[in-house]
Image (cartoon, coloured by chain):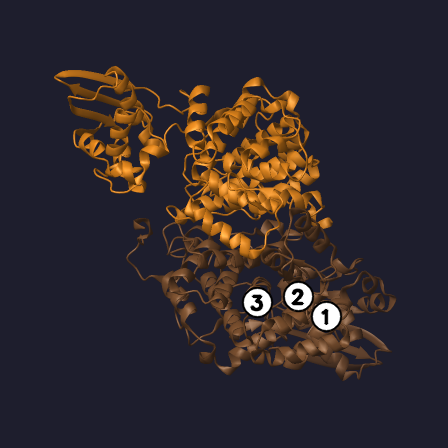
Chain colours: A brown, B orange
Amino acid sequence: MGMHIRSGDGPAYTQDLAAFLARFSYDELPAGVVHAARRGILDWLGCAFAAYRHPTLDKLLAALTENGSAGKASVLARGTRLSHTDAALMNGQMGHLLDYDDTHMGGVILHASSPVLAALLSAAELRPVDGRAFIAAYVAGFEAGVRIGQAAPEHHPGGWHLTGTLGAFAAAAAVGKLLGLDAQRMTHALGIAGTQAAGMQQNRGTMCKSFHAGKAAANGLLAALLAEKGFDSSEEIVEGKRGFARIYSKSTDLERLTAGLGREWMIATNGHKPYACGVVLHPAIDAMIQLRDKLGGRLDGVEAVEVKVNPAVVAITGTVAPTTGLHSKFSIYHSAAVAMIDGAAGIAQYTDARAADEQVAALRGKITIGVDESLRRDQAWASVRRAGEVFETLVEHATGTTDNPMSDAAIEAKFLANAEGARDAAQAAAIARATWTFEQLSDVREFVALLR
Amino acid sequence: MGMHIRSGDGPAYTQDLAAFLARFSYDELPAGVVHAARRGILDWLGCAFAAYRHPTLDKLLAALTENGSAGKASVLARGTRLSHTDAALMNGQMGHLLDYDDTHMGGVILHASSPVLAALLSAAELRPVDGRAFIAAYVAGFEAGVRIGQAAPEHHPGGWHLTGTLGAFAAAAAVGKLLGLDAQRMTHALGIAGTQAAGMQQNRGTMCKSFHAGKAAANGLLAALLAEKGFDSSEEIVEGKRGFARIYSKSTDLERLTAGLGREWMIATNGHKPYACGVVLHPAIDAMIQLRDKLGGRLDGVEAVEVKVNPAVVAITGTVAPTTGLHSKFSIYHSAAVAMIDGAAGIAQYTDARAADEQVAALRGKITIGVDESLRRDQAWASVRRAGEVFETLVEHATGTTDNPMSDAAIEAKFLANAEGARDAAQAAAIARATWTFEQLSDVREFVALLR
């Protein structure tokens, strides 16, 4: 149709990106990229399992069931089947619900796996696909989501929740890759996804925040399916005069869409959260766990703990004595105390019971928090005095940042802890084993059978 | 939850609007408002019927069917049932597909009926509801969609397709009213809808444009269902610091959200399109039909036609000899010629066959288009010379504008012409009869039975 003529005469950014997404193959992926995908799958599944019984999901499921959803695709851990997009919506919200899922480290605050993997797992029940194709599709999702975000530098300051907006592009690219869309249809998949991109920061702290991730998964999946059927869209959805980078951001950096394609893979700089709270608290938690090791785990006789962090940390985490599990996630005192006592800061450390625990409260009372402008946000210094003896530590880069990624063992331990309740120990171990050799799966439905 | 504390100390605009939407009853509606609803229902159904076999809908239906959609709610005229949200998506896209549906005249370019009625018809198959409750819900949709649009004055210049963005709010408010949500849950319905609001002008001229209307219907319906289940959201989704009026518009006019509530009803200033082309062409078409009347319909011997319009009209409709039905919609020459020959400019006047017709082409060749800056956009002047005799006319306000609304008879005639093909004559007449007394329906499902 004549109306699809491009309005600009600059590079065809969206089409070029789509052509690359349609063209690259699993065989071109460096080993580190494939491994990042394995880590991403395992970590994300644990985050979803940890949330699977959350009451917010009961409300969502009640609405979807009443609305009418054909039982075709699996909801994780709940033994329920819904339409493919509805299962993607449920699983996407589940994965992001505890804010414990991966966060990209490339300047775009995108939790890519929640929309991408939720959409892909649902799509893998629609079309049989092997592990290699699934990994390539997962990688494609990161390429689209992160690069489109980088092309719109003022998108986050503009008030948008990027996991909702960019997540739709990412999920569409991933499912489009899984479906084997050609360059033209991949362009349309991005165009149909982008025109559904939504999610406002105004909804932080409400059930809508994780809903954004689910809707991004569902909308991206639908976009790819529509494109496959020949449904069309603008072919310059990012760079066009009324395109995404123009209307969702005050400035653009369009070169980022295609710079280094095939050389720099976005999933390689994905970050994983070791602790179930905001990233600003992670350096202090690292410090406490290091001091605990220096104490040999013996806390009897601990007289005083001192922690120094970047001033920005205290501004948003200064609650001294939280009374609920939710509030305890925003307390540096609580986070430091449980980390020293338990050597961990996972879901189990942020419950109502743990917030009210006497031993935790007692240790919170011995902690002094100081600020030091010379410390970066990913740094912390801490000391502990036990029976007059002082131990110190300095965390240079918090665990989970680009300079200090979580180890594979830590990712697996986090997964196993998160999966408790949703899967028994043997099931969880089987999932972990299958994930570390994901590319060997001949049909991803075998893997999905372990998850439902 | 403590996180729901409002960030500002100004008026609680969203909550106040939601409280009004939850509270007002059908009995408070002036007769003219009820009648505007009847007109809106009839006109919109015709627009949907006229598009029911469009190939774009085949693609959408193929994707939805493959995705898995439970057969619960009716797709108009196609004898198909889908889940409630999927039926709303199909019907919403159907209603807007030909760009022939109603347009609000209150400064917000919103085609409200496509999202609102598509969502409501689907919801009426979910919960039995009478005609009065349905009309109240339809009215509520206009209140939310138009007022939220007026509160965000630079939303349209910002590049958004308002039928997609505002349509989601409108559909949620309408279904929320149908479900009898209280003020709190209505607030959440708006919050959940707003956080899904999307649709880019970049997708004009593609299949996505009418898709926006369908998604708005589906997303609004889902938002209301979720709110009913206790799913929450920000309670200041419009006025909040990161709310709709802030991030989708460069300026705000928040007073518009609540000014005159219960006295000024937005549906009362809804506009209906008499002709199946862009509104800029409507004054010229009116002029041609008036000249045709002056000629007594006898066009033999017509030597020359002259039309004068506002310069803006010609800039976008200057195609002299269109070759396809789609292109003919953007030709003032074609529009004027068919209007003079047929006395109409409906769907039948913009087909490939009509664009290629010899009589039409011959008359197009006799037409001269001039511009006159003293003419407003809703005005046109025209003259025709037949056998040396000259007839003139001046259109002061094009039909379908606030100052010259379509008559009820014209709305019904448009409906009957649009319904041809989708309904037989007896069915179409029965639908028209039922619509003019819509408030007497004891169960809207009886009405839906006439449509499927």
User: What amino acid does circle 1 point to?
Assistant: Asn
State yes or no: discs 2 and 3 in contact (Cβ < 8 Å): no
Q: CA distance from mark 2 to mark 3?
A: 24 Å
Q: In the displayed structure, would residue A440 be above or below residue B290?
A: below
Q: Earlier in the sequence, mark 3 or mark 1?
A: 3
Rendered image quadrant of residue B310: top left
Q: Position of residue A34 (x, y in %)?
A: 53, 78
Where does label 2 land, which residue?
A: A100
Q: Position of residue B257 (x, y in %)?
A: 56, 33
- Specify few, some or many for label 1: CA neighbours under 10 Å numbering under 14, 14-19, or 20 or more: many
Asked whether A260 or B209 is in front, the reply is B209
Q: Are discs 2 and 1 both within one chain? A: yes
Point out the frontmost of discs 2 and 1.
Answer: 1
Q: In the displayed structure, would residue B140 be above or below residue B381?
A: below
Q: Image point 32% across, 28% down: which residue? A: B377
User: From this viewpoint, which residue is outermost toward the left?
Assistant: B388
- Specify few, some or many for label 3: CA neighbours under 10 Å numbering under 14, 14-19, or 20 or more: many
Q: Earlier in the sequence, mark 2 or mark 3?
A: 2
State yes or no: discs 2 and 1 in contact (Cβ < 8 Å): yes
Where does label 3 land, which residue?
A: A124
User: What amino acid does circle 3 point to?
Assistant: Ala
Tag 1, which secondary structure? helix
The subunit carrying tag 2 is A
The subunit carrying tag 1 is A
Where does label 1 land, which residue?
A: A418
User: What amino acid does circle 2 point to?
Assistant: Tyr
Q: In the image, is B352 to the left or to the right of A89?
A: left
Rendered image quadrant of residue A441: bottom right
Q: In the displayed structure, would residue A311 be above or below residue A192?
A: below
Examine the rendering and report whether any part of residue B99 can be seen: yes
Q: CA distance from mark 2 to mark 1?
A: 10 Å
